[in-house]
Image (tube, rainbow, N blue to C red):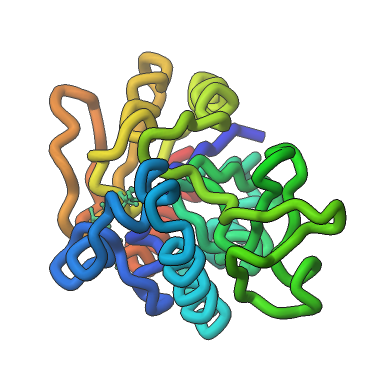
Amino acid sequence: MKKLVVSTGAGISAESGLSTYRDAGGLWENYPVMQVASADGFQRDPALIHKFYNERRKQLVECAPNAAHYGLKELEDAFDVRIITQNVDDLHERAGSSHVLHLHGELMKVRSMTHPERVYDVRDITGGGIETSLSTRDPYGDPVRPHIVFFQEAVPNFAPAAELVQEADIFVVIGTSLVVYPAASLISYVRKGVPIYYIDPNPADTGTLPVTVIREKATEGVRKLAEILRTSH
Ligand code: OAD
């Protein structure tokens, strides 16, 4: 089976009702990004950060995967599909995708402040709830924080992601503005001659790379991509 590596961003979840970050009305227009999504912001006002991610979890549990998420799952019939996502939502998992690597963390997870390797589903340590606060404790009695990669923090899953991209027989980018690094540099790890597809209604400039742009929203774009892949690969 050919290895189909797919890099997704906020655009793939837009039709599920989750805001993107940088489009008009996006999250970073309404919230100061350095307050709610940076290491400095977390140090300055951790209570605000708990509140912000509680709100985002509440939104996420009201949403469902869309046809783009399901379409990628269906491609597993014909391809060895590996998803690398910048998204912190769990919509790829809920659509049934078998291999999902999160570059920027996971909204439904929290981790120990003192033992970062202790990662929990938020519902497991809150008796089924989705909210955390400064007084939330893990089973060892330690405080927790969102399992999110804040700006100014390292991206531990970047190395395995870059390795996957190097192994790709086909590479697909969906719904990302390609401005946040190192995620945006993944495309430069694609081997020469490997076809690259980019689904986005408002795609970023990818320079001289040989990219086939599918200028569509994710649901329609993934439907078209599946047609192309089934007939020509
Ligand atoms: P952005 O908000 O920067 O970009 C969203 C992209 O999705 C844009 O290129 C839009 O044109 C596109 N888009 C909008 N609606 C779409 C639709 N229905 N179908 C397909 N594409 C659509 O989001 P990201 O590039 O994912 O990091 O942002 C990268 C990172 O910046 C995020 O992971 C997040 C943020 O700060 C952290 O929070 C750590």
Residue 76, placed above or below residue 12: above
Q: Does the image show residue 6? A: yes
In the displayed structure, would residue 120 be above or below residue 50? above
Left or right: 4, with 42 as reference point? right
View extreme (right): residue = 139
Q: For the view shown, which residue lies furthest in the bottom direction?
A: 62
Quadrant position of residue 109: bottom right
Left/right placement of residue 75 relative to residue 35 reads right
Residue at x 25% of width, y 34% of height: 211
- Where's the N terminus, which quadrant? top right
Closer to the camera in the image, 127 or 64? 127
Residue 173 in sight: no
Find residue 149 and report its horizontal and vertical position in percent.
48, 43
Tally of marks: 0
Query: Could you tell whether 182 is left or right of 126 in the image?
Result: left
Residue 206, position as x, y percentages in the image = 19, 32
Q: Where is residue 72 in the image (x, y as percent from the top left)?
A: 54, 57
Q: Residue at x 40, y 24 (%)?
A: 194
The residue at the far top in this view is 192
Task: Reply above or below: 55 against 116.
Answer: below
Q: Which residue is drawn at 39% across and 28% down?
A: 186
Left or right placement of residue 29 versus residue 218 in this view: left
Residue drawn at (57%, 55%) of the image: 146
Ligand 1's quadrant: bottom left
In percent of width and height, residue 156 lies at: 56, 29
| Between 121 and 217, the one nearer to me in the picture | 121
136 vs 1: above or below: below
